[in-house]
Image: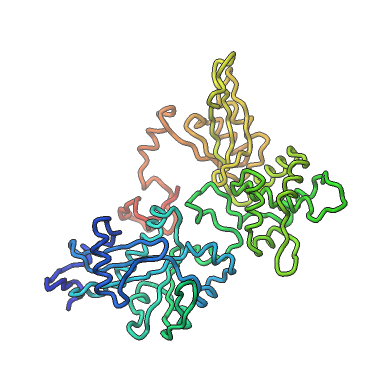
Amino acid sequence: MHTDTATIRGRLVPHWAASLELRPIRPEERDLWRTLMATHHYLGFRGFVGESLSYVACVEDEWVALLGWAAAAWMSRPRDQWIGWTRAQQWARLRFVVNNARFLILPDVQVPNLASKVLALNLRRLRDDWVVVYGHPVVLAETFVDPARFAGTSYRAAGWQYLGDTRGFARRHKRYVRHGHPKQLWIRPLGPDSPEVLRAPFLSAALMGGALTLLDFNALNWTGPNGLRDRLAALTDPRHRRGIRHAMDQVLVLALAAVLAGQQNYIAISDWIHDLDPEARRRFGCRRWGDTYKVPSEPTIRRVLQQVDAEAVDAVLNGWLDDESRRLGDAIAVDGKSLRGSGHGARSRPVHLLSGLVHRTGHVVGQVNVDQKTNEIPKLRELLDPLDIAGQIITVDALHTQKDTARYIVKEKQAHYVMEVKGNQATLAEAIAAVGHDDFSPSGGQDHRPGPRPHRNPYRADHDRAE
């Protein structure tokens, strides 16, 4: 049969690939999907365990294949060795691994290379679909292939990797029972960050519901030279020497990390610290005690935070965050906001603040008051003057798109800018609108040969351009 022609329930379908569609099943299709899977899959079907998604592949609206994804296997030696995570990390992060628990090509369907094409289509959207339904992504897909029935050819063609054979056990009623039929384990990373994010000491912000404003704890300098703990060690410990088991800088670096992770009271801070796995505790410099690392108790954390000089700790933390932002190449956004509810009484208008915020973390690196006799434009210089921003990118809204501001950022602060252009700079906006693609300098492998250049669509993903 020609590869462009499919046979679906006795009907020839030419150019079938053009109409191939892969989508999640609709609520009204759930019973039919379950019935077909139970009837035609060699394992049958009674339901999935944990989080799951079900898909259908169609050609010209005809169902040709069914796929089901569910919770990953609790334990799998080849997978766990390949990831390299600890047992504690495995239990905490297993939800970011998904299992292709069912895959069925429906009867009377003869479509060349259908299985590998359907798998590839499903993998392209699986991560995003999981975020929409369950609020977190998945970074690794796994499946188990019975070598007595299949050779895994479709998975190999779709880019999956064979890791090894299982030992022939199945989990039943919270116990593992030998069934004597080892299966092949195949895996497929769903992004460039797997398996690194699964074995990293701290959970990546990218896995926490896609919250881009969270700090990447793995990238921060907590205990290295000039790290946060080094700076906190310079503060005075207000406690009596007798009976001290945990150094003040040790307690503070753990407590501040918990606060940066979103904990807002003493009990939450203590719980977050005690939930750290051994590798994370080691990264924070905790003292080793037998097979684990000791962390301070909740009363100890409470006493230290109540007695320490809060202003000194705040200055150390802000200075460290500012230095880390520059080290990691974060941009700074300049933005003005009015404080709601502050315009009562004798004040004719609310308090208006101009702030500098780090894009990725959202923390404030500077802030000035914009009084009633002026506006934000002259205050930008006052905001940026004390900051060491050489080499960083400063983003501003259209109000600050001024020649003097651009000259100040580049010449005096040795930084770069990204400015928004709107109607307040009408001439500049018109000039930008009139710029064509050929007005950009050639770069990135474009054709430098004489003669007319071939037209390229600037919206194509593979297009090289300078910005």
Question: Image height check: is 354 above or below 390?
Answer: above
Q: Residue pushed farthest front?
A: 173
Residue 467 x %, y %: 45, 47
Is residue 393 found left or right of 45 in the rendered image? right
Quadrant where the image shows the N terminus: bottom left
Q: Residue pushed farthest left?
A: 11
Residue 260 x %, y %: 62, 47
For residue 82, say whether it is visible: yes
Residue 379 x %, y %: 60, 27
Is residue 344 found left or right of 422 in the rendered image? right
Q: Residue at x 69, y 43 (%)?
A: 319
**Which of 111 and 302 lies nearest the eye of the viewer?**
302
**Which of 52 and 78 lies nearest the eye of the viewer?**
52
- Quadrant in the picture for residue 2: bottom left
For residue 165, say whether it is visible: no
Residue 346 x %, y %: 59, 13
**Which of 156 and 296 lies nearest the eye of the viewer?**
296
Q: Residue at x 64, y 50 (%)?
A: 258
Q: How many marks?
A: 0
- Quadrant in the picture for residue 453: bottom left
Q: How is the image coloured?
A: rainbow
Is residue 195 found left or right of 69 in the rendered image? right
